[in-house]
Image: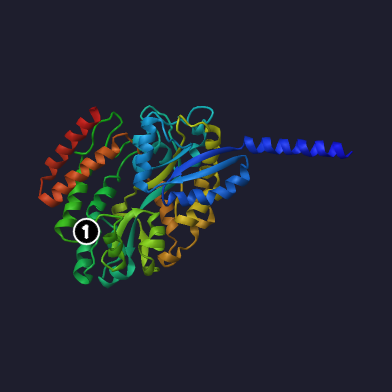
Amino acid sequence: MRTYLCKALLGCSILAAAGAQAATTITVASFPSHDAQVKAWLPGFKKAHPEIEVKLMSLAFADHHTAMTTALATGAGLPDVMAIEIGYIGKFAESGGLEDLSKPPYSALQYQSKFARFSFPQATSVNGALMAIPTDIGPGTLFYRKDIIEKAGVTEADLSKSWEGFVEAGKKIKASTGAYLLANAKDIKDIYIRTGLKDGEGIYFDKKNNVLVDSPRFHKAFELAKAVRVAGVDANIPPWGNEWSEGFRRDKIATQMMGSWLASHFATWLDPDHKGKWRSAQLPGGSFAPFGGSFFAIPSKSANKQAAWEFIKYATMNKDAQLEALRLVDAFPALIEAQNDPFIEMPIEYLGGQNARKLWKIAANNIPAVKVNRYDATAQDIVDTELNNVMERGKDINQALADAKALIQRRARR
């Protein structure tokens, strides 16, 4: 009997060891604060999939995307799951180094109706391949300091009724309080060029890959940015630096247009001392635009594709996981089921108890399904350079946009 028990125990030990050896470890590459979402998902994912271990690899935002660009080009150092911010999705989608998730064994197009209508097209290549799944979206919103605009005799309606009214309100704010309307006039361009689009259109390129930067949309964006700079109501400060954050903390910047996720940054590190003084509104002129958002992709050379897909499904299609990210870093859920959760109705203490997520949901429902292009990032850099030429050197807007179009066309033909 004793011999039998020893053999049985030995057999169990061997089986346990075999089970331990069979566990799959996947690497997830991410960046702040997206990596905070990944960390929050790990306990739940481990419970759902005890057979899969997850190793998180995180680098600073720019470093992460540079590293992933290099990894896709060389095939070395690739993770199993790659986080991609919206600004890079077009370039990565056309890289040829990612799995087409529309095909078996993923067949992910069956899940498209579960997500914000504009999110899947953002991750679809020109030949119709689905290269990534959205983890969160960035409904564009106008954040403003309620106390500053009230001191200037300006209302939320003055800020949001029209773009021209927005600029005029900025003049009143500057004259009455000394605060700038915007950190940088470029912000108004970044938002305006993303508005007024129809489903299937791109920001910089149309369906036939024609460059659009000499269109009335870009001309108006440049006009508005120039008007802000001429009026002296932007601080001419680039985002994400110390001067930018100090501008908020020292009551020098009255508004900021960006994705809804900025609320979490304000509350945790950008401007925590002004809790209760910031508010959120829809963008000026009835505009709805995406600003930010993140995706998960699987590199074609991953050795653990099935395990990687299980992690992506858990993170993006699990309501509780999506809501956890929303609670943690205000990452607005791409999953519609999570958007419909009562938590969306909860007041946000930092925004003075405002139910701002209701506004963000309305914005998300109205954002068009815009197509991305592998040269979007290149086009953005060129357009930004020409906008700077207009605002700093007095270059004619028509000439600036014509020059931008010509250079983008040359770069895209390489």
Q: How many marks?
A: 1
In the image, is 259 to the left or to the right of 306?
left
For the residue labelled by badge 1, is the local secondary structure a helix, a strand or a loop?
helix
Quadrant location, the C terminus: top left
- Determine which quarter of the picture holds residue 377: top left
- Residue 401 visible in image: yes
Query: Residue 158 in the image: x percent, y percent?
Result: 27, 62
Tell me: residue 107, above or below residue 175: above
Amino acid type of the residue that numbered disc 1 sits on in the rendered structure: Val
Q: Is residue 318 left or right of residue 269?
A: right
131 or 396, which is in the foreground? 131
Residue depicted at 55% across the width and 48% down the height: 42
Residue with the mark numbered 1: 167
Q: Residue sitting at 48 percent across and 42 percent down?
A: 28
**Which residue is depicted at the point 40% across and 33% down?**
124
Q: At 30% from the left edge and 44% from the top edge, which residue is drawn?
A: 196
Check the image and report above or below for 107 versus 86. Answer: above
Specify whether 159 is left or right of 223. Answer: right
Q: Residue furthest right?
A: 1
Q: Tell me which corner region of the image, top left, top right, bottom left or bottom right, holds residue 240.
A: bottom left
